[in-house]
């Protein structure tokens, strides 16, 4: 007796999964291309005043060592540590159209206790 054919299962892709990058990027980024803009929020100002850590939006392909070198080049400071996050873009709706904001990368740069960055 032969069984009935099985239905094909569609593979589900995890949208939030980190994309794997192999090897070094084939292009070189300049410091002003790595650091897109500073992020000025209540949480960011609290971190800058109490923990001497500053938030920046950075290029999505930038590594921690590139971010460290870019901050030390653009500002006269010494970087102690760099933490990065890939922030998922929010989905937005305008009337009947559904859209999605782009994903972006955030870097929290911790400085030496003697150094400061003045944005204003």
Image (cartoon, helix red, strand yellow):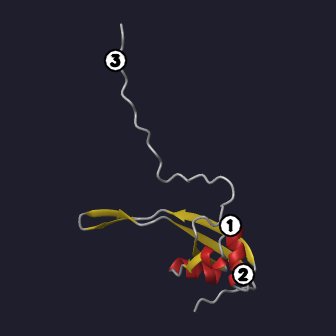
Sequence-first disc among 3 and 1: 3
Quarter of the image with the C terminus is bottom right
Corner quadrant of residue 57: bottom right
Describe residue 5's horizontal placement relative to residue 21 as left or right: left
- The correct choice, above or below, for 8 with respect to 88 in the image is above
Question: Residue 89: x, y in percent?
Answer: 44, 64
- The correct choice, above or below, for 93 with respect to 17 in the image is below
The residues bearing labels 1 and 2 have C-alpha atoms spaced at a distance of 14 Å
| Disc 2 element | helix
Sequence-first disc among 3 and 2: 3
Give the residue displayed 63% in from the left and 90% down from the top.
118
Sequence-first disc among 1 and 2: 1
Asked if disc 1 and disc 2 are in contact, CB closer than 8 Å, the reply is no
Mark 2 highlights which residue? 73
Mark 3 highlights which residue? 4
Query: Disc 1 vs disc 2: which is toward the camera?
Result: 2
The residues bearing labels 3 and 1 have C-alpha atoms spaced at a distance of 54 Å
| Disc 3 element | loop
Mark 1 highlights which residue? 64
Of 75 and 115, nearer the camera is: 75
Give the residue displayed 58% in from the left and 64% down from the top.
85
The residues bearing labels 3 and 2 have C-alpha atoms spaced at a distance of 67 Å
Number of marks drawn? 3
């Amino acid at each position: 007796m032969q069984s009935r054919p099985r239905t094909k299962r569609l593979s589900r892709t995890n949208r939030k999964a980190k994309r794997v990058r192999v090897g070094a990027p084939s292009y070189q980024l300049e410091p002003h291309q790595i650091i897109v803009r500073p992020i000025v929020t209540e949480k960011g100002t609290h971190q800058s005043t109490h923990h001497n850590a500053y938030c920046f939006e950075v290029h999505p392909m930038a590594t921690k060592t590139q971010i460290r070198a870019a901050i030390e080049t653009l500002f006269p400071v010494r970087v102690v540590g760099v933490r990065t996050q890939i922030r998922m873009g929010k989905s937005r709706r305008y009337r009947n159209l559904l859209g999605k904001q782009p994903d972006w990368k955030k870097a929290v740069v911790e400085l030496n206790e003697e150094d400061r960055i003045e944005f204003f």
